[in-house]
Image (cartoon, rainbow, N blue to C red):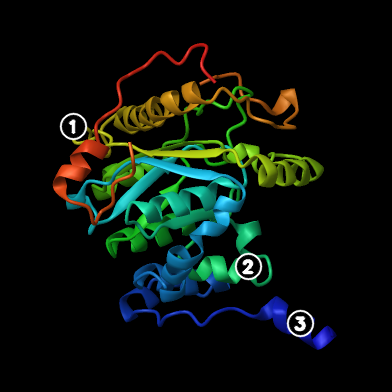
Amino acid sequence: MSGLGERLRTWRPTPPPLPEDLAALVKPDDPEWFAREMAIAAAPPWWFWRFMLRRFSWLVSIFGRVEVTGAVPPELCKGPLLFAANHIGDFDPFVIAVALHKVGVVPRIMATGGIISAPVAGPLLERTGAIRVERGTELARHAVRVTEVALVNNGHVVAYPEGRVGLAPDGWPERGRTGMARMALGMGVPVIPVSQWGAHEVLQYGNDWGKLRTLLRAVVRRPRLQVHVGPPVKLDDLRMGRVGDANRARYRIAAAITRGLVPLRAAKKTARTSSIPPDRRPRWPPTRAASCRTTSRETRSGNDALPVLDRSGSG
């Protein structure tokens, strides 16, 4: 059994070959996973990841009803995209992956290093194109380089502008950081806001026993897992390096996510279940899905911009 356990701990899918131009960028002092993730980022989406999204997305529906609105403009589907999502719990990456697959996208999702380092599941997640983020360390810069490679190769990357699960007690998005904004401005990549609500009812954030309780409850109640894919954030008047533009882009991205979230929460007034202690909470409170494969008429009807709404008193 010890031999089997060791094999499971060290097993990982075979990565694609690393292109020569990228191999020259890997230094001897880089972590061992860096070259592997660069190779995965440069390659097309893994066939097994496509297969899982196509055949097993229904597994997420065991815990709730996935409802997707909005669309990705067809003219953007074949190019690089940054999807900016609000982060409300540990289950929402699964919901977002399924929702984006419904609109014709094969996502590459940013994930913490602890998750990708886990046996079996971590290597599988890495091979799907997930980008490792070692928060609070010098290795965090490697995530930027891997993301750049993915975008240069027309990847569709999902990132959380807040950099972690939001800690606001009411669950509204926080201001976020400027990392995604700087990358979007520097590379000229469109940013698509993804607003979602309901995944927090499947896995409570911050408490292991709470996770088990909410998971079992979700199987019985099957809450609504709502995702809205909004229109691209207007950033074309901003420039990388110009004073204040990164902050302006950050606020616009956060505002776009919030606008998409307002009608989702208005339809379902459920407070987020959390065990976050008050001293860790921030003071700043901050139609049917169309596919990349749908017709232009269907896409226009599913991609109408949402109005700017007053969020006070909702959710």
Secondary structure type for disc 3: helix
Between 20 and 132, the residue placed more toward the observer is 132
Residue under label 1: 237
Quarter occupied by the N terminus: bottom right
Residue under label 2: 121
Query: For the residues carrying marks 1 and 2, which lies nearer the camera in this image?
Result: 2
Q: Residues within 10 Å of mark 1 (few under 14, many from 20)?
A: few
Q: Residues within 10 Å of mark 2 (few under 14, many from 20)?
A: few
Residue under label 3: 6
Q: Residue at x 35, y 48 (%)?
A: 82
Q: Is residue 215 above or below residue 50?
A: above
Q: Earlier in the sequence, mark 1 or mark 3?
A: 3
Q: Quote the CA–CA distance across marks 2 and 3.
A: 15 Å
Amino acid on which the number 2 mark rests in the picture: Ala
Residue 80 image point, x, y percent: 28, 55
On the picture, is 5 further left or further right than 86? right
